[in-house]
Amino acid sequence: MCLMQALKLYGIPNCNTVKKARDWLESNRIAYEFHDFKKHGVTQQLLENWLTQLPFDKLINRAGLTWRGLDDNAKANIVDNASAITLMQAKTSLIKRPIIEKNGKILCLGFIEATYKKELAHE
């Protein structure tokens, strides 16, 4: 017997994009489990799984304050998955959010309502 896992939403609670995603899920009565990067961190295994689905430059949020706060050397040192994982684990706010996954598969990255409707309406 195969048990389906619930949707899991990864992010930080005070992020406006995460708030929009959570509001959308709740208004559409879609159950999910919330994983707070600030409280629970992120494992290397989880990041490695995500990096099999998306390149590291998609997972790193280059528009945020955390990225802008990095020195040029730290930014230049992100050259592969291993260096990206090290930095994302040290500074979880660098991870683009929210990430919604189910059974280890990323369904949505960020919040675009049309994508949520397409990918999550059947949940």
Image: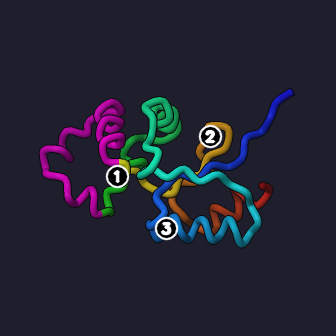
Q: Quadrant of the N terminus?
A: top right
Q: Nearer the viewer, residue 27 or 107?
A: 27
Work out which residue is located at the far right of the displayed protein and give it.
Answer: 1
Counting from the top left corner in percent of width and height, residue 115 is at: 63, 62
The residue pinned by badge 1 equals: 94
Mark linked to residue 17: 3
What secondary structure is the magenta-colored segment mainly?
Answer: helix
Marks 2, 1: nearer the viewer: 1
Secondary structure found at label 2: strand
Q: Nearer the viewer, residue 117 or 97?
A: 97
Please name the residue shown 29% across and 41% down the image.
87
Q: Which mark is residue 105?
A: 2
Q: Is residue 114 above or below residue 96?
A: below
Query: Distance from label 3 to label 2 (Cα)?
Result: 20 Å
**Residue pictured at 36% horizontal, 33% vertical:** 81
Real-space Cα distance between discs 2 and 1?
Answer: 20 Å
* Residue type, numbered disc 3: Thr
Going by the numbered disc 2, the residue's amino acid type is Lys
The extreme top residue here reads 1
